[in-house]
Image (tube, rainbow, N blue to C red):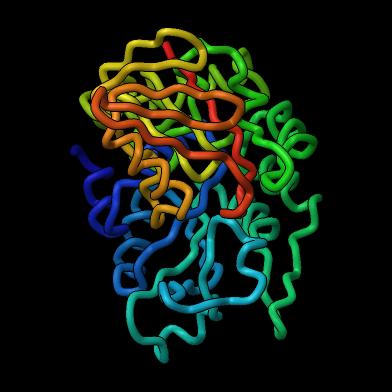
Amino acid sequence: MNEPLASIRRLKGNSWLLPLYAAVLHQVRRSMDDWVPVGSLEEFKLLMNRLGMTVLEDCIFQQIGKQERVPGAESAPTTRARAFGIGAMKHLRGWNEVHVILSTKREWAEETLHAAWYPLAVSGGRILPRPKIDALRLGLAFGYPKCCVDSFQKQNDWKAQSQLVVTYRRSVVNWRVNCLTKHTPYMTVFHIPCSQDCAESIAMSDSVLEAVRSFDESYAKSIRDFLAGTFFVLNEDAIFKLYNANVLSERIVQFNGVENVIQSRPASRSAQAIEKILSEATYAEIQDGVVLTSNGAREYFYESSFRFGWFEDPFFVVFE
């Protein structure tokens, strides 16, 4: 991988969100946020400054142990961590990360920081939710298309429906609006487009890919290749790419390989359950919310439910 992406990857310790760095550097996006290991923070800030980027530190995240139970955590389906002020950095031990805001303009970074906060668990397991207006402000601060921000405000309720179903309800969709891969190094749009025909999302996707190409042409090609293909979605936290797929109908697909595309955090229980039956199958069918799979010798099934915290509405989608 070419510079400066290679150095960013080294300091971050992973390749997630790399296309967004290219996008922010080219002002395709106004800003972004990321998580940087405490030990790499100073070197990371020096690199960003050399690239003309402002870095604002938010807080320190410390991962919650696998065996720990936090009352109310089910109300925070994605990021689950303890947060400490930056002043606590020298007192913390173990693997800790700093949540940072990045932009080419300080005023854009400050606008993002003011809107970028998470639901908080306070004493007694009570959850203090983020005001909905802050989600609107954050989407605009990041530079997402206004139509998509408005759509998110109206439709995103992960307990009641899948916004991905609403967006990708057609069986064949333009690869440029594929946001399913946002938790991999191979992505161009992080937001959920307001529709599969969103002109602004398509234009942003092209611009992000061109920004990546300006640094690394082969990486841009890998992103383009990964975005196309057949995907299975159970919920917003259980998404898989199916390889060598033969789509027989909107609800039946043959395939001979599967990859979990939620790579930036540990697999949820629902993702583990569905990945097990997909990895052992070459055929999958969806019937009234039930996923049936087979490898010719054995059959398996997964019945959609709400017991894992996400609204489950399985579907296949082909990006071309």
Looking at the picture, how far across and down is residue 110, in whole percent?
Answer: 63, 57
- Quadrant of residue 146 in the image? top right
Looking at the image, which residue is at 64% across and 76% down? 71
Q: Position of residue 211 (x, y in %)?
A: 38, 28
- Residue at x 77%, y 33% (from the top left corner): 150
Give the camera-side residue of 179 and 48.
179
Relative to the observer, which residue lies in front, 40 or 181? 181
Residue 81, percent from left and from top = 51, 71
Percent of width and height locating residue 320:
42, 10
Observer-nearest of 102 and 267 = 267
The quarter holding residue 282 reads: top left
Q: Is residue 157 above or below residue 38?
A: above
Q: Quadrant of the N terminus?
A: top left
Give the side of residue 210 with respect to residue 105, left or right: left
- Which residue is at 63% across, 34% downward? 144
Q: What is the count of numbered marks?
A: 0
Q: Is residue 4 above or below residue 67?
A: above
Q: Is 57 positioned to the left or the right of 95 in the image?
A: right
